[in-house]
Structures are given as structure tokens and as C-alpha cells.
Image (cartoon, helix red, strand yellow):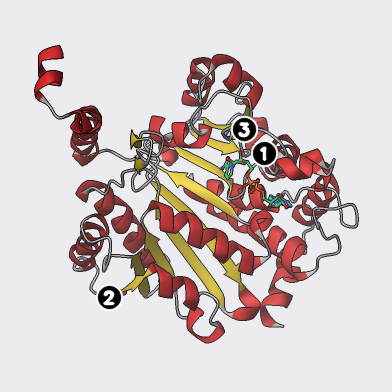
Amino acid sequence: MQKAGAAMPERDLPFEAAIDRFRGLLKEQAERVERIGKPTEWLDYATLDRLVIGVVGGDGIGPTIAKEAKKVLEVLLSGELKSGRVEIREIQGLTIENRAKQSKPLPDEVLEEIKKCHVLLKGPTTTPDEGSGLPNIESANIAIRKAFDLFANVRPVKVPSQGIDWVFFRENTEGEYVLGSKGIMVTPDLAVDFKVVTRPGSQRIIRLAFEHARKTGRRRVTVVTKANIIKTTDGLFLETAKKVAKDFPEINWDGWYVDVFTAKLIDEKRRREFEVVVLPNLYGDIVTDEAAELQGGVGTAGSANIGARFGMFEAIHGSAPRMVAEGREEYADPLSLMRAGVMLLEHVGMLEKSRRLSMALDVCGVYEQRLKVTGRADGAKASQFGDYVVSALSDPRLEERWVAHQKG
Ligand code: NAD
């Protein structure tokens, strides 16, 4: 060791250390490519005798909104809960206090409990910031996505009055995030992070987006990258899209660069034309928050994290510590997590239940708005909005109320 050090110019020493770490990262990623490249059989939820839905409260406003989302699911699924066909199981311990105590993003005993469920409805979880005094642990979300290989983050955004009906497919396990906490500080003045895109990783998310378009009768898939500049990784994503698209000749597809695509999302005329959008991880993260804002804010948007054998459904926002610090958590909007519930029911094949919940949320949260959640004391509490949705679900005229707004 000393010998090698002596032979090497001193200024190259940090590079050697960085190259060693880089070699390790490449090995890890090559193993992952091999793993995800193998064919996987999708879980067929219709074959289950008993569906177990796990519910995790999470941190900050999480427990408040999770309680309301659970409440509406319990009303909607009362028959199935009674017969034992469905179980809703609360999972404890995915709190920042427990994760910090164990210095683990996903404590083993929590992971074991989650593994006993078929799908998870999850409240947002806090990821400690630098300087927060908490251990520098990875995001619990990223840990769950990795543990269950939840490669697709699906985020619908709808604003019927403006002709907006988008479904975003964000790649969930690669890009800048997969090695997000493994960047290298090569020298005190030189920081390097990594972006990873793989062929099987791109194929599976792009294929899922095209299949969704086909299944739902949509005619267009838009692929968003920055392949003109980030030529290797985004280039591979775009090249993969071109190949996958050949299997879906009835669907039009086009490629956009993320900068102009982001601009077009606020162009009222052009944005109506988008239908299904598929993007690598970081662009997907940013663009879907922008899109959710057009729908009424992050508090209104749900998302699905889908893998072949497990699904996690959550709000697109975080634990809103500012709301908690200001004592406003009871005014948090539970619509986001209820929308995630709609996606959960659809994913497990309970299409009629999913449609009914979606109608109730449209009626209460978009059309009638007899109670409005503003995030502040001038609006309704999460629990009041929960009761409003429960009353809509119990109304035999719910569909009529919903249809009236479709026409008008
Ligand atoms: P945030 O999404 O938690 O909140 C930003 C702001 O959005 C809030 O201050 C509030 O004004 C508004 N908001 C969010 N949800 C709302 C709701 N349901 N009702 C009304 N208003 C709502 O963003 P942040 O402050 O950047 O993140 C806080 C923490 O959450 C961080 O630790 C972050 O890492 C984590 N996070 C977790 C997830 C997840 O678990 N999926 C996602 C994003 C962020």
C-alpha cells in the first residue's frame, strides 16, 4: 500500500480512492441489471383467498390523513371485511423516531410486517435533512421501493374543466436516485454524483406505460428525456422507447425534452394533447409535482408504486413538517391518500369499488365541495372531509350526482 502510494503523484491519490469506490458501485449495478433482467411473474390478485391491505401512518401529517383514508376504505369494503375476503392491517413502527433510533430507513420488524401484506397504503415519511440532528438515513420510501423493486411510480392528474387527463409513469428505481446517497466527494472541491439508466429498467417502465395506454384506450404516449445533452443514460431511455413503441403500432408516441415539456404543461392549449407520459426518475419527480399543482396542489394527488408482486400507494407529498410546527396537521388534506386508495383498489382488480371511491372524491373534492380543505383553520378538518366522503359513499344517488357534473 505504502509502495503504491510512494509511486503515485500525491495529487492523484484521491482519484484512486474514488475509482475504487466507483468500481464497487459498478459491480452493484451490474448485479442489479442481471436481477431485473430476469423474467418475473406478476402476482394475480384474483387468485388470493384473502387480500391483506397494510396501512402505515408515517410521520407529520401522515397519521391524520391515513386515518381518514382507512376510514373510507372500511366503509367501501365493509362487506369484504366482514366476510374475511379483505383484511385492513395497521402497521406500526415506520416512524422517524423508530427509524432514527435504529439508524435504519426500514427497520427489519417493520419490513417483515409489510411483507405479510399484498399492498400497502402509506402515509408520508420524513427523511432527515443534514443538520437536523438525526442520523443521515436514506428515505423510507426509497428503501421500500428497493426492497420490493417497485419500479413504476404512476401518478394520474385530472382537471376535467380544462381538458386535462394525464397519467405519468415515472421510473422509480434508477436515474439519479439509485446512487443518490453514494456520490463521491473526490476532493474537498470536487463532488461527483451518478445517474444510472439500464436497458431492462427502461424497458419495463416504458412497456407498462404503453400497456396502460392500450388498456385504457388512450392514443398517445409521450417520452420525456434530456437526451440531447445527457446523451448516454437518457439516450438509452429514448432508444428503448423507440424499440418498445414498435410493439404498439396503434399508439402514437413522441419524444420531448424535459425543459420544453415542463413549459408546455403550463400552455393551456398544448397541454390538453398529452395523455400518457413516461419519464426517468428525477424528471418524473419534478414534473409530476408541477402537474399536481395544476390539479389543486400536492394535497390532491395520489400515486402508485408498482412492482410485479407488490404495490405501495401513497400521497405524492411529504410529511409537511411546517404544517405540524404551526399546529395545522388536523387541517391536512386527506384527498391525496384517498386518491391513492382509488389506485390501490384498481390495482387489485376491485374496479367497481375503485370507480365508486373515485366518483365520491370527484363529487366531494372537485364538483360540489360542500366542505373545502385549505390546509388552514379557515377550511375543513381532515376528519370532517373524511365524514363527507363517507356520506357520499353511502348515498345511493352518488352516481347521479357525479354524472350531473360530467354533463354540466
Ligand atoms: P411536503 O410535501 O411535506 O410539504 C410541502 C407543503 O405542501 C406543506 O408545507 C404544505 O403547505 C403543503 N402540503 C403537503 N401536503 C399537504 C396536504 N395533505 N394538505 C395540505 N397541504 C399540504 O414537502 P417537504 O416539506 O419538502 O417535505 C417534508 C418531508 O417529507 C421531508 O422529510 C421529505 O423528505 C418528506 N417526503 C416524503 C415523501 C413520501 O413519504 N412519499 C414524499 C416527499 C417528501
10 Å crowding of disc 3: few (<14), some (14-19), many (20+): many
Give the alpha-carbon distance from disc 1 to disc 2, as whole Å.
41 Å
The C terminus sits in image quarter: bottom right
Is residue 1 in view?
no
Instruction: State the mark number for residue 320.
Output: none
- Please tell me whether mark 1 sits on a helix, a strand or a loop: helix
Q: Is residue 152 above or below residue 6?
A: below
Please name the residue shown 33% across and 67% down the image: 223
Which label lies toward us, 3 or 1? 3
Which label lies toward us, 2 or 3? 3
Give whichever of discs 3 and 1 has the lower sequence position: 3
The image quadrant that residue 191 belongs to is: top left
Image coordinates for residue 377, horizontal then vertical, percent: 90, 52
What residue is disc 2 on?
250
Image coordinates for residue 355, horizontal then vertical, percent: 60, 58
**171 or 191: which is nearer to us?**
191
What residue is disc 1 on?
79
Give whichever of discs 2 and 3 has the lower sequence position: 3
What residue is disc 3 on?
55
Asked if the residue at label 3 sits under 8 Å from ligand 1, the reply is: no
**169 or 120: which is nearer to us?**
169
The three-letter amino acid code for the residue at tag 1 is Gly
Q: Is residue 47 above or below residue 207?
A: above
- Please tell me whether mark 3 sits on a helix, a strand or a loop: strand
The three-letter amino acid code for the residue at tag 3 is Val
